[in-house]
Amino acid sequence: MTLSALGFAVLIWGSLALVAVVFLYELLTVWRDRNGRAAESA
Amino acid sequence: MVTTTALLGLLVAVLVVFAAFGAWYARGRIETVEDYITARNSTGGGALTATVVASSMGAWILFSPAEAGAAFGGITAVAGYAAGSALALAAFAVVGPRIRTLLPEGHSLTEYAYARYGPVMYGYVLLVSVAYMFVFLAAEFTGIASALSLIAGVPGWQTAAVVGATVLAYTGYGGLRASMVTDTAQTVLILPLLIVSVVVTLLALGGTNAVHTTVVDAAPELLTLGAPSGLEFGAYVVVAIVGAEMLNQAWWQRVYAASDEGTLRRSFLVAAVAVVPMVFLAGIFGPVAVGLGLVDAPADASVSFFLVVTKVLPDPAVIAVAVLAVLLVVSSADTLFNAIASVVTVDLPRVVDLSDSGLTAAARAVTVVVAAAATVVGAQGYSVLTLFLLADLLAAATFVPLLYGLYSSRAWSGGVATASAAGLVVGLAFFPPARAVLPLSALPAASYFLSFIGAAAVSTGLAVVTARLGNRQYDLDRLDRDVRRLDDDGALADGRGGER
């Protein structure tokens, strides 16, 4: 079965969205870790 | 056309910034060899996830998945690549906590192999692990050299020398801590750069519908779900990647670097989720390159990604892709420099009496040697594919018997060594490059599928069967007593190896 145009679009844009979510998660977690360390040392 | 001077200048500027950042961060943080190679319990979820993503995603994602998509079974083969990459990381979410529980003061997989199984299995695992990591490193250097040569005609030796020297500068000085902090920054740049590269390319090609039409018109089989060739490729590549990554010291280091077991599990699982779309996005460039008629010769398939971007993107976007490729290489190279150095350093106290500062100096010296060797090999432009596959095969025949000892008190050195050797024999018997030198024409036709699946299945089965034979019992608590910190006075004093 050949992947349809819709399926192809979902695959591509879904993958892009997932990478974007991971990027935001990464920023948030690094920021939270940094604040946690700052609070500990204060 | 991007000029050689402009690209090389930008490359040097980016790498010098990372070298300075890594060295600045590590300043004052490397007091013992433990800080240099382990960074035990020091890393929170954000940094750990970032370093696992960055270390896992080398420049290979711009070459291999696209090659699989173009030449080995289309989108199904790309899915196999994605699954293998994700499963390897997810496996550490399960095995990692076990490693930390049984060997809380450990450092490396070879150290575990020695303590659990003794010198024979230790030597074999050391060989396989270092061979895999070095071939990985050489492939990264070779890949970036060929990519920058394609984009702007940069001579391979210049690319390899600049990357090797700058990564060595901060990894040699700051060890694992410098590697991990730069990985965090690199991940924060790699993810948006990948998104931008793909989106800009899609828009330049007229959107996803236009891309889909282009591929379907030229090679519809590359978008066929469940294509037999893709399934076969996907199955063996999963075994190859999982096996090799379980013997990758970089992950064992990060298992210990995690601040706690919850962070370890979460970070490896998030990274496993992250690599799936990254591999898919890079892999889709293979079918697209075929659709655009850019893959004329079999060798073109491996550079599909770069053929597409240089064909359709304007110069600024091509430069962004080049920076992405360099960041991918650097994030893996620093990891592998330190991983190989740590494997060697951990084993040194068994053969020479060195102080803590002596061990740190030795680790730095090994890092220099590894960097020099990778730079020289990478500059040659060798094809390392066969070596890569051979290292993967060795790992596929080894990883289950090795890790079985973390769970079974009945696994024993003779049994797992026999299992690994038998798995390797079966794997080699069906390994296509081996048929040229081995007189095995009476056997069924060689294939990578039979080779990898056979090696993993036979080694797994024999490891279990040999453990069930006899009445051997190994006290797994011994591992905790036998494997100690390197900065302890009693370090390795009783690390004489386990049950034989």
Image (cartoon, coloured by chain):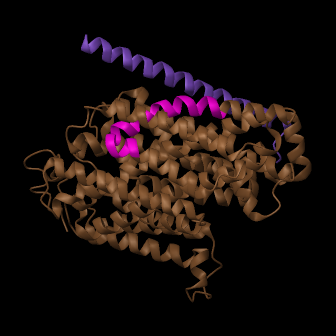
Chain colours: A purple, B brown
Q: Observer-nearest residue: B453 or B409?
A: B453
Is residue B172 a member of the stretch shown in magenta?
Answer: yes
Residue B200 visible in the shown view: yes
Task: Tell me: residue B455, above or below residue B331.
Answer: below
Is residue B193 a member of the stretch shown in magenta?
Answer: yes
- Residue B449: give x, y in percent of width and height: 61, 66
Residue at horizontal 42%, vertical 34%?
Answer: B20
In this view, the residue farthest toward the right is B217
Residue at horizontal 76%, vertical 64%?
Answer: B298
Residue B484 visible in the shown view: no
Q: Main secondary structure of the magenta part?
A: helix
Q: Observer-nearest residue: B61 or B240?
A: B61
Residue at horizontal 47%, vertical 63%?
Answer: B396
Q: Observer-nearest residue: B385 or B182?
A: B182
Residue at horizontal 76%, vertical 31%?
Answer: B200
Number of marks present in the image shown: 0
Q: Observer-nearest residue: B199 or B475?
A: B199
- Residue B184: give x, y in percent of width and height: 46, 31
Left of B253 or right of it: where is B199? right
Task: Tell me: residue B355, above or below residue B94.
Answer: below
Left of B413 or right of it: where is B251? right
The stretch of residues the image draws in magenta is B169-194
Task: Tell me: residue B310, above or below residue A27.
Answer: below
User: Where does the C terminus of chain B fall, quadrant-wise?
Assistant: bottom left
- Residue B412: give x, y in percent of width and height: 26, 66
Left of B404 or right of it: where is B205? right
Q: Quadrant of residue B297?
A: bottom right
Left of B284 or right of it: where is B271? left
- Residue B146: give x, y in percent of width and height: 65, 55
Task: Tell me: residue B7, above or below residue B499.
Answer: above
User: Where does the N terminus of chain B fall, quadrant-wise?
Assistant: top right
